[in-house]
Image: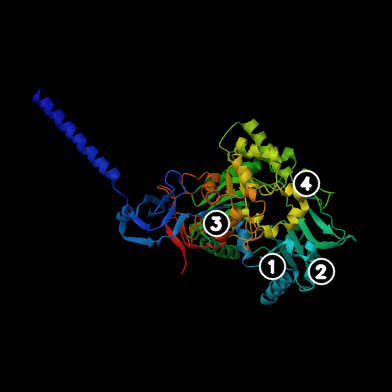
């Protein structure tokens, strides 16, 4: 009996010792390779929104908390970043971007911010003089508002400065091409040319091409432009990644693309040069088949990593309001002869969305006009009816205007409102507002109305179809609805402004949710990827009108400092 008791006591003691050892292992703090201390760190977690320090080990955050606690976790050779009271947060997630197009823009004529036809002409002429061996002069960024009398441009405007070499200039939204006579000549485009697809080859009263090509008609000329070499594309991507790091962007969601484009990023990944996380939506068209969807599904399985991921398709349902190609429910106010039109029939949209959803692919739908937004919601409703409820996380991109009756449908269907605050910069909306008139303008870029109705807001740039890639500029617009000069006073449609916290979530954790990655990034918390940025000022404390003055001073991607202000 005594022996049994003795054995029992030894067993209990042994169990207690093992439990103690196990507990000590559990409580043992991991060694941190990088720590940030003495900061005002916004975690994005409602239960613990603010901490002063962060510990990073490898590519993950391992702890957040007080300076004293985090300092104890530092390895002997850990890098210590003393924030000195500065603001830190999760890296920006640009949830709708065309990254390669933006990268190539860096080696073309940059027309961003050109405020007159004369300035556009000067920039084009200077680029041509600086690049005498370029067979084509290409560029982008011109805005409708800054042309004389807000008219569309003409080939004569370009012929006046570059008559001998072909020129192709894309508008800032990417939906309109502007070419000179030499480009039309080389492409074989004349008065006899017809374009029957989605888009318009604009002609004058004599039937001659004006030099403007809307939407798909751009292909008539764009197809003649020599494709950049693979090495050029890779170099351009490297430059754009460096720019993204400078701006605090640690994740992007490419809202268009092909398998060939994905392979470029994969090469950079293999070389250790992909210093941001990339998720791809593969572009599809109205004639997409089940076989096409199946091929994309195979691609999604091939590329399913945390740094390079394919998981969605992209449908472009309409155009833009400025050129009357967005699909509206009622005619345009300044051209009652048209209400625009969708690039898909309802049957095509419903069929493709249902096929993709059934294959486990997410669906992005570009929809700017109120008719297109309704069509997109209808397509998602059809897929829900046919496929049943699942975690689809459908997205409508842009949503520049919509009917009040469609706002509640976002929350009901679980559709993410993926929007670009930079597009609502009051400096760019004159032509936009004139096209749809005052009544529909009142429903323009209705972020707060969608949020109030329970929709999840997700913000991005749409770069290069935007006046700026900088998320800080987007943050400024979301909170103020003012230009950086402070106009209009009191904000443009101020009822749709959102709070600083809402906007920051829309640029971080909402983007992570929108790519099914909310458990691994978008917040400052243990087990999250160590994607952290430091700002020059605290956006919660600065005067809202000065938000645009904030800038990124440090960017950490997956635990490594990829940008640091000198």
Does dot 1 land on a helix, a strand or a loop?
loop
Q: How many angstroms separate mark 2 from mark 3 (CA)?
A: 39 Å
Q: How many angstroms separate mark 3 from mark 4 (CA)?
A: 35 Å
Q: How many angstroms separate mark 1 from mark 4 (CA)?
A: 30 Å
Q: Which residue is mark 3?
A: 265
Q: Which mark is residue 29?
A: none
Work out whether residue 314 can be spotted.
yes
Percent coordinates x, y for residue 313 in the rendering:
62, 45
Q: Which residue is mark 2?
A: 156
Q: Is 522 positioned to the left or the right of 78 in the image?
A: right
Identify the mark nearer the N-term, 2 or 4: 2
- Is mark 3 in CB contact (under 8 Å) with mark 4? no
Mark 1 or mark 2, which is nearer to you? 1
Work out whether residue 97 can be spotted.
no
Does dot 3 land on a helix, a strand or a loop?
helix
Q: How many angstroms separate mark 1 from mark 2 (CA)?
A: 18 Å
Q: Nearer the viewer, residue 473 or 156?
A: 473
**Which residue lies at the image location 63% right of the left edge and 61% below the top edge?**
486
Q: Which mark is residue 341?
A: 4
| Quadrant assignment for the N terminus | top left
Q: Is 424 positioned to the left or the right of 518 in the image?
A: right
- Is mark 2 in CB contact (under 8 Å) with mark 3? no
Place residue 136 in its image quadrant: bottom right
Identify the mark nearer the N-term, 1 or 3: 1
| Number of other residues with Cα within 10 Å of mark 1, as a class: few under 14, some 14 to 19, many 20 or more | some
Q: Which residue is mark 1?
A: 114
**Which residue lies at the image location 14% right of the left edge and 29% below the top edge?**
7
Does dot 4 land on a helix, a strand or a loop?
loop
């Amino acid at each position: 009996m005594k022996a049994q008791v003795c054995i029992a006591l030894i067993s209990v003691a042994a169990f207690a010792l093992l439990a103690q050892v196990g507990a000590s292992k559990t409580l043992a703090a991991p060694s941190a390779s990088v720590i940030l201390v003495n900061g005002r760190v916004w975690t994005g977690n409602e239960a613990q929104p603010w901490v002063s320090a962060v510990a990073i080990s490898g590519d993950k955050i391992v702890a957040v908390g007080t300076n004293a606690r985090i300092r104890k976790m530092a390895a002997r050779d850990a890098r210590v970043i003393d924030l000195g009271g500065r603001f830190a947060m999760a890296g920006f997630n640009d949830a709708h971007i065309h990254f390669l197009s933006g990268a190539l823009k860096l080696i073309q004529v940059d027309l961003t911010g050109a405020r007159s036809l004369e300035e556009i002409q000067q920039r084009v002429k200077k680029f041509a003089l600086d690049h005498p061996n370029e067979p084509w002069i290409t560029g982008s960024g011109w805005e409708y508002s800054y042309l004389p009398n807000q008219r569309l441009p003409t080939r004569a405007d370009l012929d006046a400065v570059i008559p001998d070499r072909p020129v192709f200039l894309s508008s800032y939204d990417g939906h309109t091409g502007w070419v000179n006579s030499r480009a039309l000549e080389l492409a074989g485009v004349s008065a006899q040319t017809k374009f029957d697809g989605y888009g318009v080859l604009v002609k004058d009263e004599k039937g001659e091409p004006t030099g403007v090509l809307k939407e798909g008609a751009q292909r008539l000329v764009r197809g003649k432009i020599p494709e950049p070499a693979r090495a050029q594309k890779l170099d351009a991507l490297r430059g754009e990644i460096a720019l993204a790091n400078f701006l605090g962007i640690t994740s992007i969601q490419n809202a268009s693309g092909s398998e060939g484009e994905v392979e470029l990023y994969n090469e950079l990944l293999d070389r250790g040069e992909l210093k941001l996380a990339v998720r791809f939506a593969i572009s599809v068209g109205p004639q997409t088949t089940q076989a096409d969807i199946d091929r994309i599904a195979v691609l999604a399985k091939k590329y399913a990593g945390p740094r390079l991921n394919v998981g969605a398709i992209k449908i472009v349902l309409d155009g833009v309001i400025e050129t009357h190609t967005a699909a509206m429910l009622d005619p345009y106010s300044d051209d009652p002869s048209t209400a625009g039109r969708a690039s898909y029939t309802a049957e095509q949209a419903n069929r493709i969305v249902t096929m993709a959803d059934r294959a486990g692919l997410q669906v992005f739908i570009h929809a700017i006009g109120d008719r297109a937004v309704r069509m997109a919601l209808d397509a998602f409703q059809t897929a829900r009816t046919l496929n049943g409820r699942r975690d689809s996380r459908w997205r409508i991109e842009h949503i520049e205007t919509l009917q009040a009756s469609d706002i509640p449908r976002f929350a009901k269907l679980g559709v993410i409102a993926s929007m670009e605050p930079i597009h609502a910069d009051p400096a760019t909306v004159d032509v936009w507002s004139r096209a749809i008139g005052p009544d529909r303008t009142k429903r323009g870029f209705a972020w707060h109305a969608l949020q109030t109705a329970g929709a999840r807001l997700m913000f991005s740039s749409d770069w290069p179809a935007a006046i700026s890639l900088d998320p800080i500029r987007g943050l400024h617009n979301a909170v103020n609805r003012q230009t950086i000069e402070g106009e209009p006073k009191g904000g443009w449609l101020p009822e749709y402004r959102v709070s600083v916290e809402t906007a920051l979530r829309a640029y971080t954790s909402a983007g992570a949710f929108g790519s099914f990655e909310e458990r691994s990034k978008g917040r400052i918390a243990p087990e999250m990827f160590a994607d952290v940025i430091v700002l020059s000022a605290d956006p919660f404390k600065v005067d809202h009108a000065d938000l645009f003055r904030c800038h990124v001073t440090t960017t950490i991607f997956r635990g490594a400092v990829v940008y640091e202000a000198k």
